[in-house]
Image: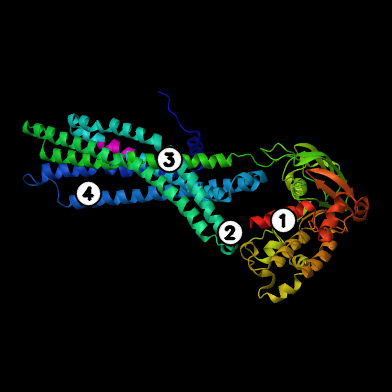
Amino acid sequence: MKLNISPYFIRLLHMHKPYRWRLLLAFIAMAVTAGTEPVVPYIFQVLLDKGFVGKPTFSLWLVPVAVIGIFVIRGASTFASSYLMTWVTTRILNEVRGQMFARMLDFPLAFYATNSVGKVINSIMFEVQGITDMVTRIFTSIIRSALTVLGLLAWLLYLNWVLTIVTLILLPLLAIVVRFTSRNLKKLNQDSLRVNAELTQVIEESTRAQQVIKIFGGQEFEKRRFHENSENLRRYTMRMTKTFSSTVPITQFMTASAVAIVIVMALIQSGNGQITVGGFVSFITAMLMLLTPLKQLAEVNGPLQRGMAAAEAVFNLIDMPTERTGGRALEKRAAGKIDLVDLCFSYPERDQLALDHVNLSVNAGETIAFVGMSGGGKSTLVNMIPGFYSATAGQILLDGESIEDISLRSLRQQIAMVSQNVVLFNGTIIDNVAYGDPDPDLAKVEAALDAAHLGDLMKELHDGIHTVVGDNGSRLSGGQRQRLAIARAIYKNAPILILDEATSALDTESERAVQAALDWLMEGRTTFVIAHRLSTVERADRIVVLSAGQVVEVGSHQELLDKNGAYAKLYHLQFSGEGTEQDEAKLQQLKKLL
């Protein structure tokens, strides 16, 4: 019969290898605990056969010494085994979480397009905990309980091998019950983990979207969504409990039957003088003591299946492909010349190309603006320059070298980026401006803040640059958050700059002030600008019009206006205040629907 051992379980065993000496000490402590079990029924036999029949043949002081000594040894060994096992499992918990978090940081952006934040959080926080719970229960229950069973069985065989044979009938019957329930438990645990991840996602989204929920009156919708997912989780929990708990009455019935048969057979043997009262009490005591470790062995199946389902989810996440790791490190600061050579890109599971044979040569220090209707490929293109996505065909060259031949870390050191979706960390202003710098230069931080027109704000804040900005900058206004992101780009001082709607959250006055800072920041840097407000790109060296992933027009602002092509139409549409007849028809249709 071939033993089917999960590869995930093998990986878990390998992770325990560095701690083998502590595990060995824990096993020794478990063996000591198990070894004390048969001593208790032995004491009962001695007391009944030699202590209560006639004058005791041993010193009475030996009784309390023996009883107290046994439980002192048992308590110390139990504490030692529990402490050592917890020490090992918590180390492994941190190790697995560290691997998952490191892996998460190296996943490509496409991973986050198909996996929810709630699922990732659930895996790192809860599924890993399920693995360590399994390990603790398995090692503790199987090792300690198995040794206890062996010790008690040895004592039972020594006392009365005939009655022990009856007791042994329990073992194969219990194995059949465990095997029957384990089939359903694994599938139920996998489904439970999925539902738990969905519930975590609901909580995460509801916490993050409080403004939207309140302004659009989504409280009842979110309550229903939470209740549905919570109820699903409850149902799976009840199904697992029903499947798992059904083994308890079956085990108890088999145990009661075995005890009843043993008592009848013992009475027969007693009538024939084959067993003493002390021997019978000792046998029954050992037999009843045997039930607890047997029950623990039966109950280990539940945590085992939960842990294996969690291990499968965790290791599948760890094994997911990451961003490429090859390429050489650049030896010096890049000049910033970018060439897009016949560049093509398509998103997974989409047939249409997001970028279709794009060719563009950008000189070092040149400012290029990308404009066009939404979905034209502007954000996709600028996200390919830092290697967030890899080209389906064609290539991107940095100073004449393919970015695929440059390590991602080295490539991204040459690039600063400010997007419309500002991301700030719940730390101080220094932490956010000098993010990624292990030894921030305070003078440089203050200069960057001044350049981003945040110097006056720093004077108003009680803690200045040491002020904590809150969750994603919640203590700052939208314009201040945007300027803080710009200060971060100024601090990095990279030769290539990407501005994706960098001034979208600013009012007119703030935009004017920040635009001056951006003009200074863009000087001497290769800059890629995406802006829907065409007034912000008029001063670009060249404007590239993208439509359906293709370059439609390239030229300066005035050149493109003189062409009277796609850019001119976009420009006049935006500044004339007039829409096309088609737009007007859509507007009238929308009014009717509303």
- Name which residue type carries label 4: Ala
Query: Mark 1 and mark 3: span between their CA atoms?
Result: 51 Å
Inspect this view and state whether residue 419 appears: yes
Residue beneath disc 4: 66
Residue mark closest to the camera, 4 vs 3: 3
State which tag comes first along the sequence, 1 or 2.
2
Magenta-drawn segment = 146-152
Between 199 and 532, the residue placed more toward the observer is 532
Query: What residue appears at the point 86 percent right and 52 percent down from the top-left corner?
Result: 567
Asked which secondary structure carries label 3, the reply is: helix
Residue beneath disc 3: 188
Residue beneath disc 1: 587
State which tag comes first along the sequence, 1 or 4.
4
Asked which secondary structure carries label 2, the reply is: helix
Quadrant in the picture for residue 498? bottom right
Between 155 and 59, the residue placed more toward the observer is 155
CB within 8 Å, label 3 to label 2? no
